[in-house]
Amino acid sequence: MSQIIDAPDSRLQHYRRDFYEYDRAYLERTCASGTYGWIVRDSGTHLVQLGRHPKMHEELAAALDITTNLDCYIVDARLATVTQVDVARLRERMGQLQYTVINGNVLRGEIRIASLDVELTPWSHGESPKGIVCLQSASSTLSADDLLALAQIAECEVVRKSQSLFTGTRSITLDGNDLHELIAQSAG
């Protein structure tokens, strides 16, 4: 990815910080796992993990709609490949979900891996509502990738329930344990 950004003919002309700070931090936060859609524009970049939640794909679609002057890539972190694709191919990939949420159940493909409950805290002393997400696993064989997906799905479901992109998440638990701690343990 840095070779694309650092190339003399790179499309990126402004806001290189998007890549060096934000995209790299996003890769770290998601343990550089799975597949990502990556957009490089004259003025910035945008990186979103694919296949996790429709809200994430909506975010990428909005970034695609900003301008036609862009380059699109599919980044496969497992294979360490970056493949340039056209907008239509990226949108096609955005139509494919590994995980879905149906009636409070999180499915990986056809397999139910967890149930999900989202509550919002009330407005209190000028503090806006926050999401509290409780997940119960349906299987004891959740991979590190499943744990990461569950965290992303939980945050997206808070946004969906609150109908605001600005609603934060106070806590996410899986079987009573802090999900972010479980992710850290699985990565270490």
Image: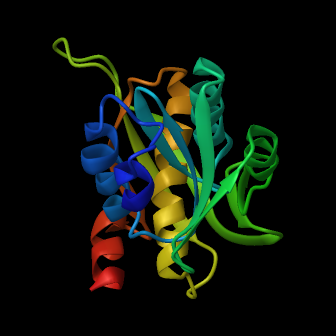
Residue 56: quadrant of the picture: top right
- Direction from residue 14 to residue 11 in the image, left or right: right
Question: From what the image shows, is residue 22 above or below residue 145?
Answer: above
Q: Position of residue 109 (x, y in %)?
A: 79, 68
Quadrant (top left, top right, bottom left, bottom right) of the C terminus: bottom left
Q: What residue do we see at 53% from left, 82% from top?
A: 143
Residue 63: quadrant of the picture: top right
Q: Position of residue 18 (x, y in %)?
A: 32, 39
Question: From what the image shows, is residue 75 above or below residue 116?
Answer: below
Residue 24: quadrant of the picture: bottom left
Furthest-top residue in view?
126
Q: What residue do we see at 47% from left, 79% from top?
A: 144
Q: What residue do we see at 46% from left, 25% from top?
A: 165
Q: Position of residue 1 (x, y in %)?
A: 43, 59
Near-viewer residue (24 or 53): 24
Near-viewer residue (118 or 74): 74
Question: From what the image shows, is residue 172 above or below residue 141?
Answer: above
Question: From what the image shows, is residue 128 above or below residue 186?
Answer: above
Q: Position of residue 76 (x, y in %)?
A: 58, 69
Near-viewer residue (65 or 58): 65
Q: What residue do we see at 48% from left, 20% from top?
A: 164
Near-viewer residue (96 or 119): 96
Furthest-left residue in view?
125
